[in-house]
Image (tube, grey):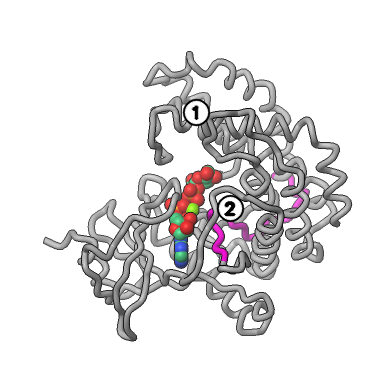
Amino acid sequence: MMEGLSDICSFFGVTAREEDITPFGSGHINRTFIVEGSLRDGNRKFLLQKINTYVFSDVEGLMENTIRVTRHIEAGLLRGKLKRERMKVLRFIPVKKGGYIFRLEKNSCWRMMEFEEGSHSHDIVTNPAIAREGGKAFGRFLALLNDFDPQLLKVTLPRFHDIQKRLEDFYLSLKTDGQARAVSVEKEIEFVHYREMQMIRFRDWCEAGNVPVRVTHNDTKVNNLLFDKEEHAFCVIDLDTLMPGYVFHDFGDAIRTFACSSAEDEKNLSLTGINMDHFEAFSGGFIAETRHILTPEEKSNLVFSAKYMTFIIGLRFLTDYINGDTYYKVIHPHHNLDRARVQFRLLEDMEKKSGRMETIIESVL
Ligand code: ADP
Ligand code: GN1
Ligand code: MG
């Protein structure tokens, strides 16, 4: 029976010994392994990923989106748009039998890609230069997809950043409360009640057609970007959530990690807040790359989008905590609650500093 990781690699034409395949990275969703092996042209490193089918039911649709978008970006690269910036796109290894997904069983779906040699990712941003690089890379990514019709993409995670849906999920979790955890999060529930209407109003305003639907990445956290040895951000990764969306999803979600002063799961909340230098650096990099494509309505709501996305991700962590940790990987029973608290503390700090954040955006526009 075929079930070792090296057997799975062989379906992609990659030869590797079991001991040369090691768990890698700190993503919350997929299972990732680094593989030292060989494919036709000699020894190389690859990344093998088991796609989380609990989260992604349409794995083929997800890969179709990814391949379409990476080809579009590569075409841009060939036209010289990116050479200047030394930017790269993920390169996937096809399955020998065809396609890019190897399905061992219904819920065992695998893909392989080239490991970007000499690359690393950050979980926390330690200086403004990294934040600026992040802003440029995610901004450029958005700008390169400006001429890609969002309707061509499958909506693999419907209403992914729709606060209405996330609130529905949250209230359902409270009603079910299967682990009797709701009683321990009364303060957080209060926090949500206090802000939900303003978030729904923002969502409704977007949905009313006030801003364009674009191709967005939808998961622009700092560890979804590869940096080289000189700390130049050169490759946007984790393309699973590529879907039609608003610029707010990418800018807001990025601020949540690029300008957060602590780890996403920091227990000591006095360390958590918005780092204004990082906010300025990320925004400056992002706007430099997107100034020409963003509408005035998009530009004037970037600060609120940081609050919206921080709220939504905090709410999702909290909901998963109440649900008994069924979605995100956790390493201890309070992990999701710790993460939710960090998001909510960060949001409170943004609320206090909104005026300064607006001034910064105006200065970089
Ligand atoms: P998840 O969906 O679980 O977040 P990712 O696709 O983000 O998985 O991969 C997890 C980690 O693996 C990333 O944070 C990054 O450090 C690393 N990684 C992903 N793709 C590559 C690649 N092509 N080359 C080098 N490292 C990579
Ligand atoms: C997940 O896969 P990863 O770790 O990059 C999640 C994002 C959240 C993020 C919070 C498909 O991202 O939406 O913002 O965790 N991805 C999915 O850290 O749900
Ligand atoms: Mg990731």
The quarter of the rendered structure image containing the N terminus is bottom left
Q: Residue at the left extreme? A: 1
- Dividing the picture into quadrants, the one containing residue 352 is top right
The x and y percentages for residue 298 are 78, 52
Identity of the amino acid at label 2?
Answer: Val
**Which amino acid type corresponds to the residue marked 1 in the rendered image?**
Leu
Let me know if residue 157 appears in the view: no
The residue nearer to you, when weighing 284 against 251, is 284
Determine whether the beta carbon of the residue marked 2 sits less than 8 angstroms from the nearest atom of ligand 1: no
Q: Which mark is residue 222?
A: 2
Label 1 Cα neighbours within 10 Å, binned few <14 / some 14-19 / many ≥20: many
> Which badge, 2 or 1, is on the more N-terminal residue?
2
Q: Which residue is mark 1?
A: 337
Helix, strand or loop under label 1: helix
Q: Residue 81 placed where, x, y %?
A: 68, 79
The stretch in magenta equals 207-227
Query: Compared with residue 31, is residue 358 higher up or lower down, i.e. above or below?
Result: above
Residue at image x 59%, y 43%?
Answer: 161
Mark 2: give few (<14), some (14-19) or many (20+) Cα within 10 Å.
many
Label 1 beta carbon within 8 A of ligand 2: no
Instruction: Where is residue 201? Give x, y as percent.
Output: 73, 34
Q: Secondary structure at mark 2?
A: helix
Instruction: Estimate the spatial distance between the alpha carbons at disc 2 and disc 1, rounded to whole Å.
Output: 21 Å
Can you say whether 163 is above or below 89 in the image?
Answer: above
297 relative position to 268: left or right: right
Q: Is residue 328 visible?
A: yes
Q: Quadrant of residue 48?
A: bottom left
Badge count: 2
Q: Tell me which corner region of the image, top left, top right, bottom left or bottom right, holds residue 334.
A: top left
Residue 26, x across and y down, in percent: 44, 50
Q: Nearer the viewer, residue 133 or 321?
A: 133
